[in-house]
Amino acid sequence: MASASRVHVEVAIESLDVEALRGALDLSGCGSVVTFVGVTRAVADGVEVKRLEFDAWEEQLPGVLADLGEQACAQFGVHSVALAHRTGVVLAGEPIVAIHVASPHRAEGFAACAWLIDELKAQAPLWKREVTVDGAVWKAGLG
């Protein structure tokens, strides 16, 4: 948790509760909640995906996520942010990342949410291994 409940971050190991995370938002004065949830694909590039495996620099990840949330609040004028990312094994259809942005109006919420997922993928100390029916490979970046 950072800065008087304005930003809430979680690193989820076994599961990610998207709705519970949304409950961490401060909605006072807000007319919009924008949410992004990234899930594991069942098929990637025509190949069945068994699972994704995420590894993280766990001592650094919460701080990076909190910094991104604070930057989004300052840059886009949103009221509060709640974001979480899974580590470990994530099966097809399960949530990997969830971002909720509370803002007075929708435009800044959408902009902040899009910026947050892009920056999370670029900056977060996370690594992804994709396990398919054809084998396993570490993917460069989180895209």
Image: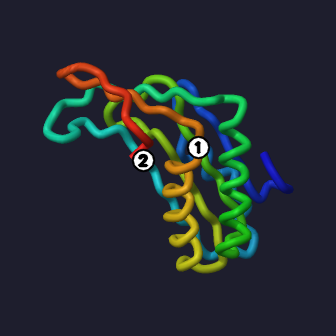
Give the residue at mark 1: 124
- Residue 122 in the image: x percent, y percent? 52, 50
Of 23 and 55, which appears nearest the observer? 55
| Figure disc tally | 2
Q: Left or right of 88: which side holds 123? A: right
Could you tell me which residue is drawn at 53 percent across and 72 percent down?
111
Q: Amino acid at mark 1?
A: Ala
- Residue 27 in the image: x percent, y percent? 70, 66
Could you tell me which residue is drawn at 14 percent across and 39 percent down?
46
Could you tell me which residue is drawn at 29 percent across and 40 percent down?
41
Could you tell me which residue is drawn at 37 percent across and 28 percent down?
138
Q: Amino acid at mark 2?
A: Gly
The quadrant holding residue 33 is bottom right
| Residue 14: numbered disc | none
The quadrant holding residue 45 is top left
Question: Element under label 1?
Answer: loop
Give the residue at mark 2: 38
**Image: 11 above or below 66:** above
Q: Quadrant of the N terminus?
A: top right
- Residue 117 in the image: x percent, y percent? 51, 55
